[in-house]
Image: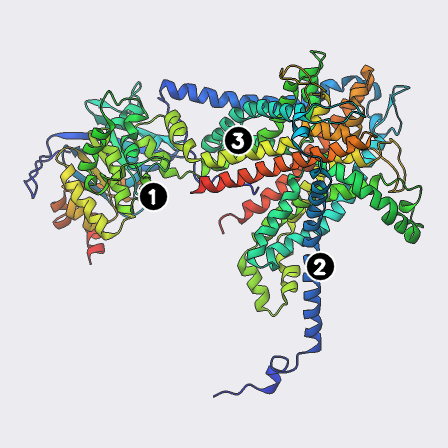
C-alpha cells in the first residue's frame, strides 16, 4: 500500500489553497454573469409580450376583428380589412415565392457542386440580410411608379423576395438530407430525373419544405416597412390585389404613431393579434418539422 | 441556421435524358434565372432610381450634412451618422448580453432547461418589429425620459454624449430597442458555434485543473472566436437595416448631435418617414439613393458575416 | 473469350450470353480511370459473381452495366456493353430505357419512405404510368412471391415500407426491382448490410430467381461467391489503382484451380 507524501496532497485533502478558492469564487461569479445575461434576454421577451397582452387583451374582441376602421372619435373601430389584407398579400407572396424557391433549392441540392451554385448560395444568404425597406423600394420602382398607384401585388412582390432566400436554403438542406440510396433506387427502376425528384425525393422532404414555407410566412407577416409605399393601406374593404390594401401591421404602425389615445389602444390590440399570429405560425413550423422527421 | 456544404457528389443528368427530363431541367433553370435576375435587378433598380441624385450630388452626398426637402438640397451624413451610432450602441449591448446568454446555454445550463430557454430567446426574433416599436414608444421611452436619462445626465453629464435636452426618443433609445431585436441573432448563432467546439478541447482544459469558467474563457470561447464575431457582424447587419422600430423611437430629425439623448435619423427611417410625402423627383431620387447606400452597406456587412460563419463550420467538417 | 466449360453442379450453359462487355473502361471525375479494358460475357440464367479486393472497381463496373454510373459528376465510359444485340452506349440509346430492362439492388436497402409496401413494389410501374390495366395487387403478389416475401407481408401491404426488418426491406427492394420485369438483375453487395440469416435467405432467393433472370452480383464475401454463383470474375487494382479483370471462369475452377497466380493469392489469402 502506497501512502501519498503529504506535500503532494496539500490542497487536495483538507483545507483548500486560498488562491484556488479565489478562482472558484471568480468562476462562479462569471457563471452568475452569464445567468444574468440569459435572464435579461428572457426578461425582455416576457416584458414585451406581457405588456402587449396586458394592453391589448381587453380591446381584442369579435367586434374589433370584424369591424372596419372608423375615424377618430367614433367608437367601434376594428382591423377587419387589415386582417383580410394581410391574408391576401401574404398569400399571393407565398404563391410567388414557393415555386421559385423550391425549384431553386432542388437545383442547388441536386446539381449544386460548381462555382456558379456556390455564388448562388452566397447570393441567397446575402439577399436574406438586405433591409426590407430597400426591397420595398425595388417593388415600388417596378410595380408602383410605372402604374402611378399603390397595389397589394407590389407588396406581395416585396414579401416574396424576402421569403425566397429562406425557402431556397431550407429546401436545399431538406432535399440533400434524403438518402442517396433512395434516389439511386429510383434511377435503378428506370425512372427519369423528373420522376425520381418529383415523385420520390420531394415527398420524402415535404416536412422540411413545409416548415420552410411556414417560417417564411411567419417572417413576412411581421414585416411593415415595404408596405409603406407598396400596399399603402386603406380604410375600406378591398379584395382587388391591384388596388391599395390595408394590412394589419401597417395599421398598428399608423395607429401607434398617431396622437390619438383611442388609436393607441387599437394599436395594442392589433399588436397582440399580430404577435399571436406570428407565434402560432412559428409553432406550426416547428411541429411540421417534427412530423416530417418521423 | 447553420450552413452546410455538400458531402456526396450530386447526380447530374445523363446525356440521353427523355423529354420529361428536358422539361424538368428547363423549369429548374427558369426558377434559378428568375431568382438571380431578381437579386441582381434589385441592385440595378436602386441605381436606376437614384440616378438623378447620384448625378446631381455625386460623392458629396455622403458627407453632406444638410437634408433639406424645401430647398431641394440633400445630404446623407445625418442619416449615416444616426444609423452607425444607433447600430453600434445596439451591438455593444447585444454582443455582451448575447454572448453571455449563449455561453450559459451552451456550457453551463442543465440540459433540461437549455433548450426551452434557447427557444424563448429565439422567440424574441419572431416578434414583429412594429410591436417592438410600439413597446419602445410607450414603455421604454417614458422610462428613459423619467428615470434613466436624467440619472445618466446627473452622474455622467460631463461627457458630451449625455448632455442636452431629454425627450425620451433619440439615439440611445433606438440603440436599446435595436439591441433587444438583434440579441437573438447573436445568441443563437454564438450558441451553435460554441457547441461546435470539440469535447476534447474542453476536457483538456478541465484535466489541467482549470475551473469551469477558466476552461470556457480561455479555451472554448477563443476557439469559437471567429464564429462569434461573425454572429455579431450579422447582427450588426440586421441593426443597420431595421426600419420600423427605429423610426418609432428615434425622433426623426436630420441633425448630427453629440448627445445620445438627441433625436436623430437613420437611413431606413427617413425613407419610411418621408417617402410617401416626397413630391419632387430629386427628393424621391435622393431617398432611393439612401436605399442604395443601405443596400451596399448591408451587402458588405452580411457578406463578411456569412463568410466568417461559413468558415467556422466548414473547418469543423471532417472531424 | 468463350471457352467450352465442363458441366458443373448446375447445368448452366455458358453459350447463351445475356450481356457482354467489350474493352469497357470506366472513368470518373473526368479523366480518372476506375476500371480498364474489361471484356467478358455474362451467361443467361446464370449467377456471375464479381469478386476482388476493395478498390478493384467491381461496383464501378457493375454500375456501368445499367448506365447508372454516368449519373455521377463527370463520369463516362469507353468501350461497349452489348445487350439484346445493341451496344447500350451507342448514340440514340435511352439510358432510362436501359435501366428498365437491367434492374439493380443496392447494398443499402432503400424502400421509398413515404410509400406503403404495395406502393413500393409497384413504384417502378406506377410512377411511369405503365400499369397498363393490370391491378397493382396482382403485380405486387407476383413480385413479392418471387422475392419470397409474400407470405410475410400479404396481410400488411398498406404498412409503410420502412416498417419492415432489414432483411425484409432488402427483399422488398428486390421485389420492387423484379416488378418492372427486367431481363437482368444487378446486385451491388446486396447482403453486406444484413445479418447472417437474412443473407442466407437472399442467397437461396438468388438461386430461385436465376431460373427466370440473369444475375450479376458484386460481393466482397468469397464464401458467398463460392456458394451461390455459377461463374466468377476476379478483379484487382493494378499499380496505378486502375481496376482490371484478372480472370473469369466457372466458379468451381476459380476456387480450385485458378489459372492466374494473382487469383490464387487472393483466394488462398482469405481462406487461410
Q: Which mark is residue A33?
A: 2
Q: Residue at x 72, y 18 (%)?
A: B48
Whether tag 3 and tag 2 are in contact, CB under 8 A, the answer is no
Label 1 SS: loop
**Residue B77 screen position, x and y as percent:** 84, 31
- How is the protein colored in the picture? rainbow
Q: Is there any visible trace of residue A203 in the rendered image?
A: yes
Marks 3 and 1, how far apart at CA: 32 Å
Mark 2 or mark 3, which is nearer the start of the sequence? Answer: 2
Q: Work out whether B92 lies above or below B200.
A: above
Task: Quickly name the residue at label 3.
Answer: A117
Marks 2 and 1, how far apart at CA: 59 Å
Is A291 placed left or right of B287 in the picture?
left
- Closest to the observer: C100 or B222? C100
Tell me where residue A140 sits by quadrant: top right
Task: Quickly name the residue at label 1.
Answer: C241
Is B25 placed left or right of A20 in the picture?
left
Same chain, labels 2 and 1: no
Callout 3: 10 Å neighbours few (<14), some, many (20+)?
A: some
Tell me where residue C16 sits by quadrant: top left
- Closest to the observer: B221 or C93? B221
Label 1 marks a residue whose chain is C
Same chain, labels 3 and 2: yes
Label 3 SS: helix
**Residue B215 screen position, x and y as percent:** 63, 63
Q: Work out whether C149 lies above or below B115.
A: above
Label 2 SS: helix
**Residue A287 screen position, x and y as percent:** 51, 41
Residue extending farthest to the top is: A147
Q: Which mark is residue C179?
A: none
- In which quadrant of the rendered image does the N terminus of chain B lie? top right
Amino acid at each position: 500500500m502506497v501512502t501519498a507524501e503529504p506535500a503532494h496532497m496539500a490542497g487536495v485533502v483538507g483545507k483548500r489553497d486560498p488562491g484556488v478558492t479565489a478562482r472558484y469564487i471568480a468562476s462562479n461569479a462569471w457563471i452568475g454573469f452569464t445567468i444574468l445575461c440569459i435572464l435579461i434576454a428572457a426578461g425582455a421577451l416576457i416584458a414585451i409580450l406581457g405588456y402587449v397582452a396586458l394592453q391589448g387583451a381587453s380591446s381584442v374582441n369579435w367586434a374589433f376583428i370584424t369591424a372596419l376602421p372608423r375615424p377618430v372619435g367614433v367608437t367601434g373601430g376594428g382591423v377587419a380589412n387589415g386582417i383580410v389584407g394581410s391574408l391576401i398579400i401574404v398569400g399571393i407572396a407565398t404563391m410567388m415565392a414557393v415555386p421559385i424557391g423550391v425549384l431553386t433549392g432542388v437545383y442547388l441540392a441536386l446539381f449544386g457542386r460548381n462555382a456558379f451554385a456556390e455564388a448562388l448560395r452566397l447570393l441567397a444568404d446575402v439577399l436574406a440580410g438586405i433591409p426590407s425597406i430597400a426591397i420595398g423600394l425595388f417593388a415600388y420602382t417596378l410595380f408602383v411608379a410605372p402604374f402611378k398607384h399603390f397595389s397589394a401585388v407590389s407588396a406581395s412582390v416585396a414579401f416574396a423576395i424576402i421569403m425566397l432566400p429562406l425557402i431556397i436554403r431550407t429546401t436545399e438542406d431538406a432535399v440533400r438530407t434524403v438518402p442517396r440510396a433512395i434516389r439511386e433506387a429510383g434511377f435503378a427502376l428506370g425512372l427519369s430525373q423528373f420522376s425520381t425528384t418529383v415523385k420520390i425525393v420531394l415527398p420524402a422532404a415535404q416536412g422540411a419544405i413545409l416548415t420552410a414555407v411556414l417560417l417564411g410566412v411567419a417572417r413576412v407577416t411581421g414585416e411593415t416597412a415595404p408596405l409603406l409605399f407598396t400596399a399603402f393601406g386603406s380604410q375600406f374593404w378591398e379584395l382587388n390585389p391591384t388596388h391599395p390594401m390595408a394590412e394589419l401591421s401597417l395599421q398598428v404602425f399608423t395607429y401607434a404613431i398617431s396622437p390619438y389615445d383611442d388609436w393607441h389602444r387599437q394599436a395594442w390590440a392589433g399588436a397582440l393579434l399580430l404577435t399571436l399570429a406570428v407565434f402560432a405560425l412559428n409553432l406550426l413550423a416547428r411541429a411540421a418539422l417534427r412530423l416530417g422527421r418521423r | 441556421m447553420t450552413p452546410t456544404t455538400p458531402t456526396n457528389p450530386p447526380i447530374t443528368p445523363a446525356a440521353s435524358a427523355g423529354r420529361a427530363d428536358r422539361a424538368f431541367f428547363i423549369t429548374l433553370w427558369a426558377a434559378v434565372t428568375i431568382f438571380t435576375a431578381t437579386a441582381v435587378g434589385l441592385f440595378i433598380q436602386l441605381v436606376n432610381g437614384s440616378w438623378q441624385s447620384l448625378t446631381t450630388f455625386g460623392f458629396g452626398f455622403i458627407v453632406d450634412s444638410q437634408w433639406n426637402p424645401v430647398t431641394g438640397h440633400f445630404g446623407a451624413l445625418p442619416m449615416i451618422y444616426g444609423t452607425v451610432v444607433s447600430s453600434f450602441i445596439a451591438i455593444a449591448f447585444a454582443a455582451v448580453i448575447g454572448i453571455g446568454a449563449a455561453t450559459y446555454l451552451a456550457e453551463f445550463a442543465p440540459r433540461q432547461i437549455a433548450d426551452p430557454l434557447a427557444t424563448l430567446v429565439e422567440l424574441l426574433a419572431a416578434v414583429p418589429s412594429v410591436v417592438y416599436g410600439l413597446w419602445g414608444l410607450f414603455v421604454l421611452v417614458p422610462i428613459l425620459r423619467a428615470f434613466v436619462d436624467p440619472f445618466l445626465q446627473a452622474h455622467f453629464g460631463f461627457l458630451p454624449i449625455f448632455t442636452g435636452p431629454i425627450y425620451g426618443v433619440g439615439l440611445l433609445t433606438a440603440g436599446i430597442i435595436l439591441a433587444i431585436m438583434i440579441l437573438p441573432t447573436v445568441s443563437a448563432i454564438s450558441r451553435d458555434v460554441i457547441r461546435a467546439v470539440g469535447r476534447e478541447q474542453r476536457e483538456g482544459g478541465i484535466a489541467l485543473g482549470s475551473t469551469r469558467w477558466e476552461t470556457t474563457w480561455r479555451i472554448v470561447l477563443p476557439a469559437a472566436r471567429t464564429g462569434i464575431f461573425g454572429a455579431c457582424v450579422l447582427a450588426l447587419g440586421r441593426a443597420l437595416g431595421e426600419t420600423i422600430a427605429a423610426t418609432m423611437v428615434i425622433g426623426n430629425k436630420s441633425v448630427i448631435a453629440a448627445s445620445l439623448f438627441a433625436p436623430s435619423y437613420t437611413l431606413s427611417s427617413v425613407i419610411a418617414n418621408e417617402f410617401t410625402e416626397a413630391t419632387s423627383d430629386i427628393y424621391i431620387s435622393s431617398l432611393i439613393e439612401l436605399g442604395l447606400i443601405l443596400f451596399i452597406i448591408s451587402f458588405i456587412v452580411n457578406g463578411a458575416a456569412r463568410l466568417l460563419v461559413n468558415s467556422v463550420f466548414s473547418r469543423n467538417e471532417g472531424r | 473469350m468463350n471457352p467450352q466449360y465442363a458441366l458443373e453442379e448446375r447445368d448452366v450453359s455458358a453459350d447463351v450470353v445475356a450481356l457482354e462487355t467489350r474493352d469497357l473502361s470506366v472513368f470518373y471525375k473526368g479523366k480518372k480511370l476506375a476500371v480498364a479494358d474489361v471484356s467478358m460475357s455474362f451467361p443467361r440464367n446464370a449467377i456471375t459473381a464479381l469478386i476482388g479486393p476493395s478498390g478493384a472497381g467491381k461496383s464501378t463496373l457493375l454500375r456501368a452495366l445499367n448506365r447508372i454510373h454516368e449519373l455521377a459528376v463527370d463520369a463516362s465510359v469507353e468501350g461497349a456493353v452489348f445487350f439484346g444485340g445493341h451496344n447500350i452506349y451507342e448514340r440514340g440509346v435511352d439510358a432510362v430505357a436501359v435501366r428498365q430492362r437491367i434492374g439493380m439492388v443496392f447494398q443499402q436497402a432503400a424502400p421509398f419512405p413515404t410509400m406503403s409496401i404495395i406502393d413500393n413494389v409497384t413504384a417502378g410501374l406506377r410512377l411511369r404510368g405503365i400499369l397498363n390495366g393490370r391491378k397493382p395487387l396482382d403485380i405486387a403478389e407476383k413480385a413479392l412471391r418471387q422475392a419470397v416475401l409474400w407470405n410475410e407481408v400479404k396481410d400488411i401491404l398498406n404498412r409503410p415500407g420502412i416498417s419492415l426488418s432489414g432483411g425484409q426491406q432488402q427483399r422488398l427492394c428486390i421485389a420492387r426491382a423484379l416488378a418492372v420485369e427486367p431481363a437482368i438483375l444487378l446486385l451491388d453487395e446486396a447482403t453486406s448490410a444484413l445479418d447472417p440469416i437474412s443473407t442466407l435467405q437472399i442467397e437461396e432467393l438468388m438461386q430461385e430467381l436465376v431460373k427466370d433472370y440473369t444475375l450479376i452480383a458484386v460481393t466482397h464475401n468469397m464464401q458467398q461467391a463460392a456458394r451461390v454463383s455459377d461463374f466468377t470474375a476476379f478483379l484487382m487494382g493494378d499499380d496505378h489503382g486502375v481496376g482490371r479483370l484478372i480472370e473469369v471462369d466457372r466458379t468451381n475452377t476459380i476456387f480450385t484451380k485458378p489459372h492466374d497466380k494473382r487469383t490464387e493469392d487472393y483466394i488462398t489469402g482469405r481462406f487461410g
